[in-house]
Amino acid sequence: MMREAVAAAAVPVRRNALRRTLDAAYRASGALAALCLASIAAVMLLQALLRNGGILLPAADEITAWLCGATVFLALAGTYRQGEFIRMALLLGRLPRRLRRICEAGCLVTAAAFAGYWAFWTAVTVAEHIEFGDRAHGLLAIPIWIPKLAMLAGTAALFVAVLDDLVTLLRGGRPSYDAAGEARRADGVPDHV
């Protein structure tokens, strides 16, 4: 009897711990994207300052390009969870509640399949780069898998975020993008559908 009570009490704690862990991972991915964006500005500013002194910053273009890619991929999960991706909101919003949930679940299954496929093949590509010792072409010949890790991290985070919303929807909850959209409307910000 006591064991059952302890086990029953532990279930919500695990769920809350999982929720906190997932939310922290999404925030960390977004923070890394912001750091990459700030790093782009720093590299470009440094390049401009050095150029005024007659000094060239080698590989600045390559570094900036890798940071641009990292910014985009690392921001995917957070952008998705804030409801900033283009969705079928016009169509889904006109459906009856039950049919809407069914269609939304179908959309999330499809999105999870695409995001999972993307993350899987990105992981395969990174593994192949490591296996073959591929290096970047240009002035900064680093192992190419290093900048591609941001792509892998971003696509994997997007996959987990979509699965997170699918599980939430199937358990009767509201997906993160729906809650974020409602919060924006409550603040008087119109939808940008």
Image: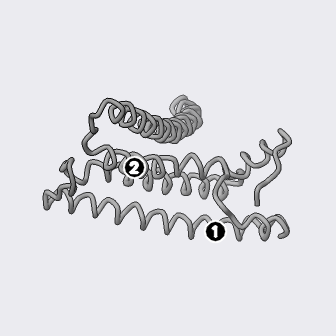
- Which residue lies at the image location 74% right of the left edge and 64% below the top edge? 101
Query: In the image, what residue occupies the spot 13% across and 61% down?
Result: 132
Q: Which mark is residue 107?
A: 1
Please tell me whether mark 2 sits on a helix, a strand or a loop. Answer: helix
| Place of residue 67 in the rendered image (x, y in percent of width and height, measured from the top left) | 39, 45
Quarter of the rendering containing residue 2: top right
Q: Of the residues shown, which amino acid type is indicated by label 2?
A: Ala
User: Residue 163 or 65: which is nearer the viewer?
Assistant: 65
Q: Secondary structure at mark 1?
A: helix
Q: Does residue 11 sit above or below 127 in this rendering? A: above
Q: Is residue 52 left or right of residue 31?
A: left
- Relative side of 17 to 171, left or right: left
Toward which corner of the image does residue 47 lie, by quadrant? top left
The disc label shown at residue 148, or none: none
The disc, 1 or 2, on the residue closer to the chain's N-terminal end is 1
Residue at 42% across, 34% down: 45
Dot label at residue 153 = 2
